[in-house]
Image: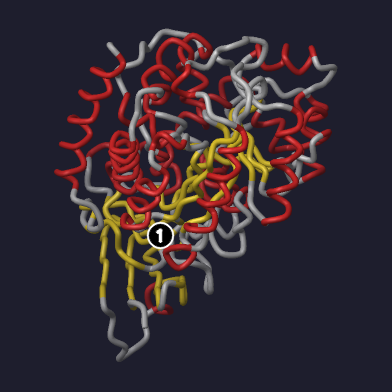
Amino acid sequence: MGMRVLIRAKAVIPMDRKGRVVREGAVLIEDSKISSVGPREEVRVPGAKDDLVIDEPYGVVIPGLIDLHVHLAQALIRGVVPDDVTLIPWLRDWVWRLQGVYDAEDGRASAELCVLEMLRTGTTCFLEAGLHRRYGLDGIAEAILRSGIRAFLSKKVMDLKGYATVENALPEGMIEDGEQCIKDFLEMRRKWAGAGEGRIDVWIGLRTPGAVSDEMFRRAAELADELGAGITMHLAEVEEDIKYFASRGHTPSSFLKGFGLLGRRRVYAHCVWLGDQDIEAFASTGTSVAHCPSSNLKLGSGVAPVVRMLRKGVTVGLGCDGGPSNDAYDMVREMKTAALLQKVFNGPQAFTCWDALEMATVMGARALGLENRLGTIESGKKADIVVFRFDHPSVRPFTDPASLVVYSATGRDVAHVLVDGKPVVLDGEVRTMDEERVLKEAERRLEAVLRKSGR
């Protein structure tokens, strides 16, 4: 039998429909699932015994946040890579050269640091962009399993050395053999898909066009369909990507369509440079987008046409991306950035706090194919829950809870986090990880990476 948990708060935002807030609400969790949600007097069962009661007089309860684009390996190099560089030199001259000297200890340390931050700031589920075998695939998966977070781990698949129209962009340490990539993916999926009572899944993380041959694109699509795995990839992040597709006689969507890479459980990150034809294709096929506003802003990559995508019916979730491009794995901050950015280009009424919340919860679940299990606080769904404690001056007086979450709060206002009904964060403390050890190890491993890279 699982735990029975009762959560009481000043407001519950179930996300079952836009605008709904349950004032003086409660959520009851039994055996990893949500049993009931509503006003306090309707949820509490007289005489029943709870294993844990969370009572927050100025609390707000929301579904667990879902980060659709995470680089676990980049948490370690936050603040090391220059802040004022465009994407391709940023990758070629810095990020890939640092990651290209990683060993399994470095990879695990970075992953643990990343997960620690995500849990503390309310992320309960994430999609990894693509793991290189040098990071230590099993060590990372073991750390994820122990942490209690829900994870979609993607194995990087590539067989060329370029990036878009740039030849030989990848340094030697980041190049992988195509056949070995496939073998690693299959082994990783065999060992880890379904682990942690279904908390872990394994997808294919295709390297960006220019580093993947046509044959490998087709093979990856066929393999994913055969195994029921998802696919993720960076797409149309910078203008150079569009030039690559044009050189092949394609737009991004027509290129993907030719390889069978459009459809459900296909999540493409950034999509800054999609045109109307691409947006229509994504909408009609159920293809999803991971919008990464902070990363796009910092690297000067452009502004994704999110409002146009949403109006056409594209599923658009949010992603924090990586340590050097965002400098945080805080989905609460990312919601605000997303909302403000779209208002600037589309007007203040075109994008609301509810749109941001929906992208971070409902849309994220839909993109992963889990809309029947995650994304809202409804009876029968998995109990992935975040509880804010609004006791800081920046979130008071207590007014519109949805607006406060998106525009006033940060991840540091998160007090409690549950995944599968199990408390992984209580009173701001991650109960499943040794925080002091993780932080010390991250400092130690960064020193090693800098030595090995000659930086």
Near-viewer residue (333 or 291):
291
Is residue 410 among what the camera can see? no
Write the residue at 61% across / 16% down: 162
Q: Secondary structure at mark 1?
A: strand
Q: Position of residue 28 (x, y in %)?
A: 39, 74
Q: In the rendered view, would you say 275 is above or below 387?
A: above
| Left or right relative to 96: residue 48 | left
Q: Quadrant of the C terminus?
A: top left
Residue 163, picture quadrant? top right
Q: Give the residue type that dot 1 points to.
A: Ile
In this orientation, which residue lies closer to the viewer: 302 or 17? 302
Q: Is residue 211 above or below residue 134?
A: above
Image x and y of residue 336, in percent: 45, 33
- In the image, residue 332 sits, relative to residue 3, either above or below, namely above
**Percent of width and height locating residue 327:** 35, 26
Front in this rendered view, residue 280 or 87: 87
Residue in the picture at 32% in, 67% down: 8
Q: Position of residue 318 (x, y in %)?
A: 53, 38
Quadrant where the N terminus is found in the figure: bottom left
Residue 240 is left or right of residue 359, and the answer is right
Q: Count neighbours of disc 1 (C-alpha within 10 A) and say few if under 14, some if 14 to 19, many if 20 or more.
A: many
Residue reaching furthest to the bottom: 47
Q: Which residue is mark 1?
A: 385
